[in-house]
Amino acid sequence: MIVFPHRYNEPIKTGEITLAFRDWNTLKLQKNKIYKSFNLGLLKILDIRFRKLSDVSAEEIRGCGCRSLIEFKKEYAKLAERQVDFGAEVCTRIEFEYLGSDIENKKKVMGRVTPLELYELKQKILVIEERSEKPWVVRTLRVLVKEGAVVSDDLGENLNIPSQTIKSHMTTLRELNLVSRNCRRGYSGTPLGLKILKILDKKD
């Protein structure tokens, strides 16, 4: 289990925080495994490795929710509950993705849904496409499946959709558990997104 200060909950849920650094001398979590974080929800571990504290970059500091190196050192030492030598010590770097608040959400994200739920989801998507001046759901999912992970600006350029509209579209797809967001890597399709795309492509 990995625990975060309560103030980090919302930024983690929105994908603004995707990194954590811990004072661990062993890798307590496994890559590609899903864990429950106390009072937060389910996290998928995208990467975990040892890292020299002196090598932590400014981008990584922002990715774990800190605004400066000074704040990062203060937060890290507080979690470690000891005096830390930031010039010589090694930490555990954890990159993760927020999946949702409960096991039912996890099941949906991973594509473990009933035929009825899948049918209802397909119908919702067809309604969205019909009401759109330019159908975008299937096109978006195809790009994400092909590219793996795409940042917002590149996705908008690829689909010829304004950035603000892309953000609105991605919010809709995240609510349907079809895409996930990582602040550093961008948007990517979930297993459920891949499953529903195959169904929609058969329809075509």
Image: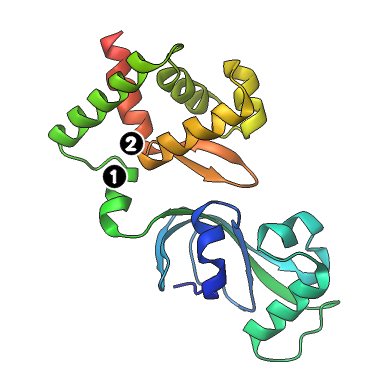
Q: Residue furthest top?
A: 204
Residue 22, position in %: x, y? 62, 74
Q: Which quarter of the figure has residue 151?
A: top right
* Cβ atoms at labels 1 and 2 below 8 Å apart: yes
The tag on residue 192 is: 2
Residue 159, position in %: x, y? 57, 17
Q: Residue at x 29, y 44 (%)?
A: 108
Residue 82, position in %: x, y? 70, 91
Q: Residue at x 44, y 25 (%)?
A: 141
The tag on residue 175 is: none
What is the secondary structure assignment of the residue under circle 2? helix
Identity, as a three-letter code, of the amino acid under mark 1: Lys
What is the secondary structure assignment of the residue under circle 1? helix
| Relative vertical location of residue 27 with respect to residue 105 in this rendering, above or below | below
| Relative vertical location of residue 47 with respect to residue 204 in this rendering, above or below | below
Side of 73 where 17 appears, left or right: left
Q: Is residue 103 visible?
A: yes
